[in-house]
Each structure stands twice: as structure tokens, then as C-alpha cells.
Amino acid sequence: MNITIVGTGYVGLVTGTTLAELGNSVYCVDIDEKKVEGMKNGIVPIYEPNLEEMFLRNIQSERLFFTTDLKAALDKSEVIYLALPTPPGEDGSADLSYVLKVANDIGDMMNDYKVIVNKSTVPVGTADRVREVIESKTQIPFDVVSNPEFLREGFAVEDSMNPSRVVVGASSEKAQEIMAKIYQPFTNTGIPIIFMDEKSSELTKYAANSFLAVKITFMNEIANYCEKVGADVDKVRLGMGSDDRIGHRFLFPGIGYGGSCFPKDVKALIKSGKNEEFDFQILEATEKVNAAQKVILVGEIEKYFNGNIEGKTIAMWGLAFKANTDDIREASSLDNISILLDKGAKIVAYDSVAENNVKKLLGDKIQFAKTMYEAVENADALFIATEWPEFKNPNFELMAKKMKNKAVFDGRNMYPLEIPEQNGFYYKSIGRKTIQQNPS
């Protein structure tokens, strides 16, 4: 089948590459000429494990194409996926201007039946708005479908090729048949395709992400309570997660959630609720708790230095909002850097993948190290903000020699407590006892 993907951001590029891998001819459209030219030459514009190999394979197999010409791609395709940004506005609502602008263009350009598939995360009722815009421009028949993505950054290729389910919101039987044909390679292997109405499909994505944000935040609350009463959050987590009604995933405590999805989707669902005079009280509490959790270790760093961190050098391992991505949107590292700089600290950071994105944002406000051990050279303390695999088994003896103070503030609970304790480090993590070591 010939398919057009409008938008080559994270969702669009992964979706387009996956659909090409399934044997379709896929035309990816973007207005950024430089980006399109780069992709034509095999340059993947985002970091995602295992994406480049599949991307290049499908370009070479002539199933994956890139263009700035929406009309040319539209004329070749029966199915048009909209994978456009829906950033939060000042009031938290999702900005649909990109989606509605392309819907307007499609209405002007289409000359035969199309299925318009909304892949972007959008508020309930967006399919109706897209339909109204296109209907105002053409008499040619078409259908609008909601088909939300459930990709995890860092595991997007795995998730796209082995989805837990495919959700499709479509009122038209013809559109359902076309979508079933596209996803037949998945359903043939037993992956369910769940058909529903468009509004239910749109809400499914918001509900799923918001629930996971609540789950993470609840676990962080439990972790903070563990510290008050002397319990160990790792043991509590294992006990809870063994209940199959709860499960082990998204129970890891840390310095809050970030990224492109959870913060934006929680805000958007809260705002959508208010539009209907409904308060999502649990989501409002989640936002408040998460904002405080992201910077909870700053107070601990100040406490370690007797209330004054001015002039202290803080090494930071990790800048991305999570491991295996270069995404720094809503990253906890940035919140902590901002506060630490305001308090007079100096930051030396290491993240080989996300470094360039932070440089574009912060410039020379912080220093960047070439290695994790260079970052801790003469550091007064180490702050771990991202759970990159390379940080899992560091050389504590080498760190002890390089650092001014053997102090680690771990926002991702990277190590069993006995490891820093055996190496004589002060070690503060989340929801576990503090390993004491006075500053030298």
C-alpha cells in the first residue's frame, strides 16, 4: 500500500520507517528542506536505538522516501498519517494549529478518496474538527481515523515492530478495512487490533499516559515516605510489583517524569477536563508532586554542604530525560541545573548523546566533559540525573581519587547501597537510607 506520513518528528519517522518495513511504500513529508535532504542521504535526525539500520534498509529497498511536496505525496497515497506536533499552550491545552493547517491543505489538494489517520496525541473531538475542516474544502469522499501511538522513547523500534495492541478509532467500515489491511502483519502474529469510535480512541492515549504518570508519581510519594519511616523502597517496589494487578513496570522511584509525552498529556487532559467543567484532581496533584520531585535532591545537596553550595562544582551524569534518547524535553536535569546555577554552583555535565541538545539550550552556562570520569575531576559532588547503562558499574576507586568529596546524589537509584558504602562514599538516593560520609 502507498502511505504518506506528514511530519518526520519522533512519531512520524518511527511510524514511517516501520510501515515501510512492513512492505508499504511510504512517503514522508516535512517542510524542513535541510532535514529532508539529510534523510534522503541516510541521515537519521533523531537518536533512537536500532532505528538507523531499519531506516537505511528501507531507503535502499526503495520503500521509504522523503519530500517537501505534500501534493505529490498525497497523489500517490490512499492513506495519509498526520504525525504533527501538538505542543502545550500557555493554558496547557494542546495546540492543534499544525494538525488543522495540514487538514486544510489536504482538503485543497485531494482529488480522490483518502483515509486521514491522526497519529498525533490530540484531545477528544479532534477527528471531528479535522473532518469539518476537510469537508469545508472538498466534496470528495474521505474518512478520518484516530490511531494513537504507544511508543517508548529508547524502545520505539521494538515497540513499533512488536506492539502490545493497535488502537483504531474509525466509524467507517471502509476505513476499518483499510486499517486492518495495514496492520495485518501484526494481527497475523496474534497482536490485537482494537476498533472503537474516534473519541474513545483519542481519550485512550491520554488516559494511558496520564495513568502511567500517576503510577510513577505514586511510587515517588511512597519512596519519600520510606525515608521518613526507615523502609526501603526497593523492597516495597518488589513486593508491590509481584501483584499481577499492579506489575513491576513504572514502579521505579526517581527524580520525576519528563519527556515529550507525560507532562504534555497530563496538562492537556487537565485542560480538556476544565473545558467540560470537570476537575481531574488526581492529575492536578500528580503535576504538583512531580514538579517538587524533580528537584528534591537540591535540598539534600545543600544540606550536605551546610546550606551553602556557592562555588561548589557539581558533576552531572546524564542530561536526557531518560536513557537511550537524546530528548531533553522536560528533563529533570535541566530543572536541577537551573536551580544549582542560581545558587552559585558550577556544573560539569556528561551525556554523549544529549549533550548537543543541551548546548543549544544553555550554551556556555555549564561545562561539558568528554567522559564520565572527566566530569568528576575535582568535583565536590556527583549528581546522577539519567540512568544510562554506562553509569551502572563505575570505578568507585577512580572516582574517589578524582573527586574533592566522595559524595553522590543519585536521582535514579543506580547502585545497591552496599557498593558506595564499601567504597566510603556519602550516597543519597531516593526512598532508601542515606549512606553517611562526612565531607572532607
Image (tube, grey):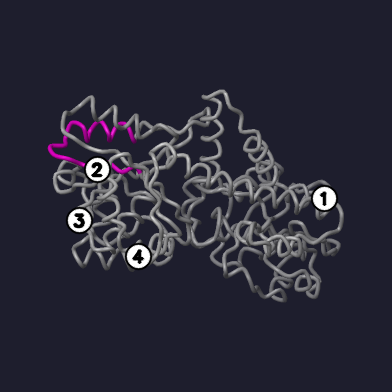
Residue nearest the observer in this picture, 107 or 370 = 107
* Disc 4: which residue: 52
Q: CA distance from mark 2 to mark 4?
A: 28 Å
Q: Which residue is mark 1?
A: 303
What numbered label is drawn on residue 107? none
Q: Where residue 274 sits in the image (x, y, percent)?
A: 56, 26
Reply yes or no: does residue 273 show up in magenta. Answer: no
Give coordinates of residue 337: x percent, y percent.
63, 48
Q: Residue at the location (58% across, 51% down)?
A: 366
Q: Quadrant of the N terminus?
A: bottom left
Q: Earlier in the sequence, mark 3 or mark 1?
A: 3
Of residues 188 and 440, the one drawn nearer to the viewer in this rendering: 188
Region in magenta? 99-118
- Residue 284: x and y, percent? 64, 35
Q: Which mark is drawn over residue 1?
A: 3
Image quadrant in which the C terminus is located? bottom right
Lateral position of residue 74 relative to residue 234, left or right: left
